[in-house]
Image (cartoon, rainbow, N blue to C red):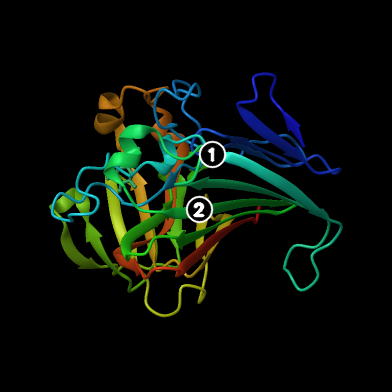
Amino acid sequence: VTFSDDNSRVIAELPTGESVTVLLYGATVISWKDAQGDEKLWLSEAAKLDGSRAVRGGIPVVFPVFGTAPTHPQTKDLPQHGFARTSRWEFLGKSTSESQTGSAANGPAVKLDFGLSSAAPGLDPIAAARWPFKFNLIYSVTLTQTSLTTSIVVTNDDSAPFDCQVLMHTYLRVKDITAVQVQGLADASYIDKVDGGARKTQSAAEVTITGETDRVYTPAGDPGAGPVTVVEAGRPVYAVTRDNLSNVVVWNPWADKAQGIADFAPKDGFRNMICIEPGAVGAWQSLEAGDAFEGAQTITLLG
Ligand code: BG6
């Protein structure tokens, strides 16, 4: 594990060459490369990496609110997608293992742990005032030769209950969005945010992206049941599995929306990305004092 000169990011590399880079600001994964050096995540060329705004690309962590919630008293004053992605996290350390027995991925692995809590250094004063609860977040990023896992544990350290939502806003890199099919969402109900929040059911076996797409899917059954698979030109490239995260947001801004997003570059970059965002956002997770919520995603390279 190495740190960038300015201590802004942590870089971990496996002996076989795969690497992951995590910005302490937001604990945002900003790069994930395979052994050939091919980047798996999309990161805007105009993304701010200096802590002045949430990172456009990579894997921002959404907590404690997905979007905004004007009618939810505890989070109504928080910015879109909460404060986790705009707070500086602490690096808690790394652990390595030679092989992961019992896991699909065998071979070396490295895990990086990050923390954000109400205790010092905590949140910036504005976020702390808007979210006055005692809480603790542990976010872990695990790299293997064929996969990346991000997992979060939210603990309520307060004496009062609080509600939260959690989501991993993963921008997967693709070569050509028009050749992409997303499998594993057939028959799932979803909220279509592009159509005024209409409730719909995924009728086609595959999701294809032909325009602005912003959907909150709730696949039936256990979150661990089956992967959401990104297929490109007929070839499966990523399998996303979930642990305890009931929802999957599929987002692509397409041309017009990308035009209007200041830090989205190049403007035709929407062709090279698809957000597949596992989360617990359909309902509030109500955590009693002392309770914890845990959720994770694993993205496996299939290509
Ligand atoms: C997605 C939301 O998760 O994030 C979209 O469903 C939103 O509605 C997108 O536009 C990007 O959000 P932001 O705050 O990073 O621009």
- Left or right: 286 as drawn, with respect to 273: left
Q: Position of residue 140 (x, y in %)?
A: 61, 52
Q: Is residue 131 above or below residue 190?
A: above
Which residue is the site of mark 1? 89
Whether residue 212 is visible to the viewer of this picture, yes or no, is no
Q: Secondary structure at mark 1?
A: loop
Confirm or deny contact between disc 2 and disc 1 (CB under 8 A): yes
As measured in the structure, the alpha-carbon distance from the residue carrying label 2 to the one carrying label 1 is: 9 Å
Q: Could you tell me which residue is drawn at 50 percent across and 34 percent down? A: 88
297 sits to left or right of 163: right
| Residue 137 marker | 2
Amino acid type, mark 1: Trp
Q: Is residue 192 left or right of residue 205?
A: left
Q: Give coordinates of residue 295: x percent, y percent.
A: 50, 64
Can you give x and y, in whole percent of width and height, for residue 105 in the image? 75, 62
- Mark 2 / mark 1, whichever is N-terminal: 1
- 43 or 177: which is nearer to us? 43
Q: Residue at x 46, y 42 (%)?
A: 60
In terms of secondary structure, where does tag 2 sit? strand
Query: Relative to the observer, which residue lies in front, 146 or 247?
Result: 247
Residue visible at 70% across and 34% down?
Answer: 11
Drawn side of residue 277 relative to residue 37, left or right: left
- Residue nearest the observer in this picture, 110 or 128: 128
| Residue 216, quarter of picture | bottom left
Specify few, some or many for label 2: CA neighbours under 10 Å numbering under 14, 14-19, or 20 or more. Answer: many
- Single out the residue that lies furthest toward the front: 159
Ligand 1 placement by image quarter: top left
Image: 81 above or below 2: below
